Amino acid sequence: MNAATQDARPNPAQSPAQRPAFPFSALIGQAPLQQALLLAAIDPGLGGVLVSGPRGTAKSTAARALAELLPEGQLVNLPLGASEDRLIGTLDIETVLRDGSVRFSPGLLAKSHRGVLYVDEVNLLPDALVDALLDVAASGVNTVERDGVSHSHEASFVLIGTMNPEEGELRPQLIDRFGLMVELQNCFEPSVREEIVKARLAYDLDPVAFRARYAREQAYYVERIRAARNKLAQLSFDDAVHAHVSALCIDAAVDGLRADLVMLRAARALAALEQSDAVTSQHVDCVAEAVLVHRRRQRDTSTADNAAGGEAISRDLPRSSAMPSSSDVEAGDGDWGYLPPQPSATTRVKGVIPLNVKKR
């Protein structure tokens, strides 16, 4: 029997981490987050979900709620102070040298297999740790190498990273590798706030009774995830879906092709969740924002347009405001304080473009 359908009378001395989870089906006003988490549960190869939002927006509550819907019902927390060895595991080299056998001590990645690996404040983790984490989340395999000896094991889990943007952002190279992203906002709708608070107070008063009211919905989610995973391999993409995905990604001026691949897989996961016979453009539209919100960039103006515009501006400016001529620079009497040009290697560096935040 899945953990979603089991309960024990809570002990008043239990810590919040030991209490039964708040039901996934009882989350209020979190439809985009619930959809993203379900898609990642159906296809962990999406690369996980990054949840950004201010304090008190139920980020950790949603992560714990999803975990009990999965076959193992396992939630593994990655603490901020974790070492690389604690994350990926260790190899006993002395054993290898002594008798030729590989002795592997599993890390948190192994323990999270078929469950949820939850990383709170992922933006505060060392980049190397996040990089290793995302590699395994996308591939489903963890490989540990020490002094020419290696060991691999399955590590298929739903990666959920949360962050408060007030505490700093992830580097663009890392944020792009999260498959989906959801940006939560503070709720300023009185009726919704009241509904959320009432639900939380009822849960705190009697978690078992509260969860019992949602037992049927919880069991339904468990069955939907199971059926969707079985359906996933049966769905493919026609040319119309490919074309629609390409158009959306080009319009968003994303870097590379990761967005196209993730969008196709997310659309397929949604079609499987809905038990559809085919992946459609409507499925693509439903997942597009979660795929693009952290990858969207402003489209660069073409070099030709820039050159033409620059020439027009130079012609319109009075001579005192225009760029100095080469003779001005060489004479050292230009208004702009330019040094004489010197040959040097150049590298084009793109500026960081703010994310296009969508209000919800």
Image: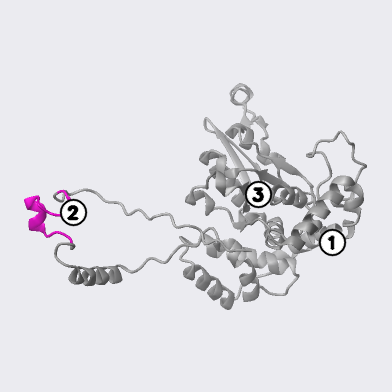
Q: Is 234 placed left or right of 295 in the picture?
A: right
Label 1 belongs to which residue?
220
Q: Which residue is mark 2?
A: 336
Q: Say which mark, if any, is on residue 159.
A: 3
Look at the image and say whether residue 335 sits in the magenta stretch.
yes
Q: Secondary structure at mark 3?
A: strand
- The answer to whether 343 is drawn above or below residue 33 in the figure is above
- Name, please, the residue furthest toward the bottom: 240
Q: Where residue 146 sits: x, y (%)?
A: 55, 31
Crowd rating for badge 2 (residues with CA inside 10 Å; few <14, some 14–19, many 20+): few
Residue 236 position within the rendered picture, expressed as x and y whole percent measured from the top left: 64, 70
Who comes first in sequence, dot 1 or dot 2?
1
Q: Which comes sooner in the sequence, label 3 or label 2?
A: 3
> How far separated are the C-alphas under marks 1 and 3?
22 Å
In the rendered image, the vertical position of residue 126 relative to residue 276, given as above or below: above
From the top left corner, tell me how far across and down residue 240 is, in percent.
57, 78
Residue in view at x 52 percent, y 32 percent: 148
Residue type at tag 3: Leu
Tell me the element at label 2: loop
The answer to whether residue 150 shows anywhere in this view is yes
